[in-house]
Image (cartoon, rainbow, N blue to C red):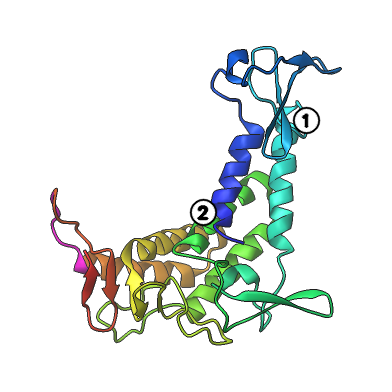
Amino acid sequence: MKNSFLVFKFLLCITLFQSANLKAQDTVRVTPYFSKAGNLMYDIKLGTHYLITDKNYNILPWYSSDLGESYDFVLNNLWKFWDEMPYAFDGTKYYMIHRIRPFVVKHVPYYAPGEQDDDGIGGDQIQMILDSWAKLYAYTGNPKVLENMVYMAEFYLARGLSSATDEWAFLPYPWHTSQKADFTYDGDLRNGKGVTQIDKAGDFGFQLNNLYKMTGNERYLEAALKIADVLSAKMKTGDAENSPLPYKVNTKTGEVLWA
């Protein structure tokens, strides 16, 4: 699973929404024909599906010509995929870990630390899914969605923050460098242990504040305020050449690695 949230948004765009005036001549000289449902079809594929449009050449969803029905189908399928994601080495969901290689134990997908691969989370993937799930929960009211948001937030707060004594304290790290079985987040993929990305910290604080509003759990508000306090205290006046906050810092020493 790589960048699953980008895939999430991409699938919605491709399968649900109409194209901007798709013309017959844009279909590589393929002659369209009408289906039994009265929709125009083309012998060309978009991904693994043949292209279908209405009489105005607007792309239709593959699941159903009813946009609302297709919207619900895609959302529920994506949630089902996420909800049924296999567990990793210590009972942690796969999407909470980064760069591990799967292998099979008794025909069941099993994930262990140690070997790196191109799969797993990166940057602010958890923040993005918290944002997406807040909208999904508002749309569906499915309590399992909110439970999943709490699971991710609790996991990150327990295993992913810089120390209270650090120069940049209480900020989340984007990656776990040690590949330990506890999947503790402790650094940055490229710059190593003790390095964090400041914009990702701000995003996590924002999502924690939203989660506080949804649950009433003041722990999330307190964690968000700690992040905000650190960032506001470090902020400087910016201009066209200088950002108010750096991009990457060593949380313990305060060294700026990328302004």
Q: Are marks 2 and 1 in contact (CB under 8 Å)?
A: no
Front one among 9 and 139:
9
In the depicted structure, whether residue 30 falls above or below residue 245:
above
Residue at 39% x, 67% y is 224
Quadrant in which residue 69 is drawn: top right
The mark nearer the N terminus, 2 or 1, is 1
Tell us which disc is closer to us: 2 or 1.
1
Is residue 212 visible in this depiction of the protein? no
Residue at the spot of label 2: 131
Q: What residue type is labelled 1?
A: Ser
Q: Tell whether 186 sits left or right of 54.
A: left
Would residue 74 appear left or right of 254 to someone viewing this image?
Answer: right
Q: Which of 116 and 183 is in front in this view?
A: 116
Q: Quadrant of the C terminus?
A: bottom left
Residue range of the region highlighted in magenta in the rendering: 234-239
Q: Which mark is residue 64?
A: 1
| Vertical position of residue 237 compared to residue 54: above or below | below
